[in-house]
Image: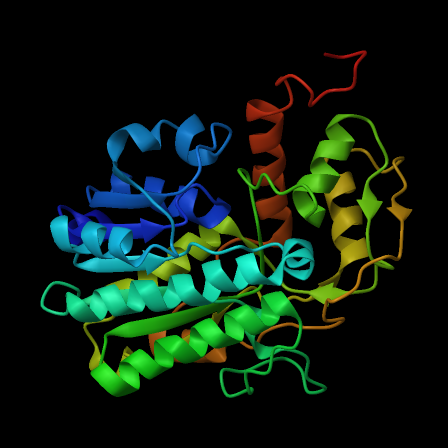
């Protein structure tokens, strides 16, 4: 059914070298789609390159903040479906340099939306990747799709703004756009080792104690990347339904956990329980507790998460062990 839907459709993916974008691009290519990727930087360790997927897609070299590169890609390749996944996703990076994050996440989003609007005769569905961070901090949990968007810190603000831009293009132009808000994505191919899952796995592979930047008690949803790809595609495949245009959906496992509990699960999966984490308690500009209610996706889309945390972590560990553990600099000096 999936291959039947996507076969020979022209699909545009931004952020294709990132965690979600790499897996999304590979899944679409496997399904027979004609995929066009907007790529800014060469990232040879990305799953897009390592899996060979980059050899099976069309690549447009450009930046999200360059409107005419985005427009050219959508117009010249006659794009029908758009997955806007590209963003600056690291909270710490956003705190250090808010402007570059705003350029990528806000301006980049309006460039994609405007290009889709200009090419309205071509584009039939646009899925904009948001985040639970778009909601900001609220006393009432879990977040539903009706929770106000009130980001305060730079990254959170950028996602709140991107969501509002998407809604504006729907309300103003009836652009067939939908918004996805996921918890913390993890999985093989995440090369941002400041994040807790890849950072802990890498430390354990090296026989080192993992580092927790916070006090370990921050609470989050953790959502496996292949689960997220399934959610995005499931949503996009139903966007011929007009009632889904302009809609936002939460996607996640609805099993919030503390950072410390996730680290303990990873170490257990890797049989490395003896590596007690180092807790720095230095995190700032981050929301302490946030997790999602996904009943809307279950009811309107008939969607549910497929992977448990243990299953997702086991698959992630295998990816890093197989693809990265033997790379130079990944093992300890004694093992390399």
The image shows residue 315 at horizontal and vertical percentages of: 56, 39
The answer to whether residue 104 is above or below residue 246 is above
Answer left or right for 1 relative to 90: left
* Residue sitting farthest toward the left: 121
The image shows residue 37 at horizontal and vertical percentages of: 30, 44
The image shows residue 26 at horizontal and vertical percentages of: 34, 39
The answer to whether residue 329 is above or below residue 13 is above
The answer to whether residue 45 is above or below residue 5 is above
Locate the C terminus by quadrant. top right
Residue 129, can we see it? no
Answer left or right for 232 relative to 241: right
Residue plotted at (46% across, 56% down): 228
* Residue sitting nearer the eye, 224 or 92: 92
The image shows residue 283 at horizontal and vertical percentages of: 81, 59
Q: How is the image coloured?
A: rainbow
* Residue sitting nearer the eye, 284 or 141: 284
* Residue sitting nearer the eye, 241 or 13: 13
Residue 96, can we see it? yes
The answer to whether residue 146 is above or below residue 108 is below
Answer left or right for 97 relative to 6: right
* Residue sitting nearer the eye, 115 or 182: 115
Q: Please state the total of marks drawn on the protein image.
A: 0
Residue plotted at (73% across, 67% down): 286
Q: Residue 61: which quarter of the image?
A: top left
Residue plotted at (23% across, 64% down): 115
């Amino acid at each position: 059914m999936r291959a039947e839907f996507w076969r020979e459709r022209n699909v545009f993916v931004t952020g294709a070298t990132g965690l979600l974008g790499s897996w999304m691009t590979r899944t679409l290519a496997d399904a027979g789609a004609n995929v066009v990727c907007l790529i800014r930087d060469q990232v040879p360790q990305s799953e897009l390159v390592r899996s060979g997927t980059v050899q099976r897609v069309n690549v447009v070299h450009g930046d999200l903040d360059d409107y005419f590169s985005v427009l050219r890609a959508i117009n010249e390749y006659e794009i029908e479906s758009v997955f806007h996944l590209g963003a600056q996703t690291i909270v710490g990076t956003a705190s250090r340099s808010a402007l570059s994050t705003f350029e990528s996440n806000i301006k980049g989003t309006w460039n994609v939306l405007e290009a889709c609007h200009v090419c309205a005769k071509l584009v039939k569905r646009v899925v904009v990747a948001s985040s639970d961070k778009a909601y900001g901090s609220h006393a009432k949990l879990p977040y539903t799709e009706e929770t106000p968007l009130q980001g305060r810190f730079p990254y959170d603000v950028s996602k709140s703004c991107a969501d509002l831009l998407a809604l504006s293009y729907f309300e103003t132009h009836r652009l067939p756009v939908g918004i996805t808000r996921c918890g913390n994505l993890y999985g093989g191919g995440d090369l941002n080792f400041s994040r807790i899952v890849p950072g802990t796995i890498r430390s354990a592979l090296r026989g080192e104690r993992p580092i927790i930047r916070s006090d370990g008690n921050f609470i989050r949803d953790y959502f496996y990347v292949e689960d997220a790809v399934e959610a995005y595609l499931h949503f996009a495949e139903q966007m011929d339904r007009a009632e889904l245009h302009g809609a936002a959906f939460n996607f996640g496992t609805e099993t919030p956990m503390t950072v410390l509990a996730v680290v303990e699960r990873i170490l257990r999966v890797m049989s490395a329980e003896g590596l007690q984490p180092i807790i720095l308690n230095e995190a700032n500009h981050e929301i302490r507790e946030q997790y999602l209610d996904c009943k809307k996706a279950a009811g309107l889309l008939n969607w549910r998460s497929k992977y448990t945390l243990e299953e997702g972590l086991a698959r992630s560990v295998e990816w890093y062990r197989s693809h990265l553990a033997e790379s130079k600099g990944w093992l300890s000096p004694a093992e390399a």
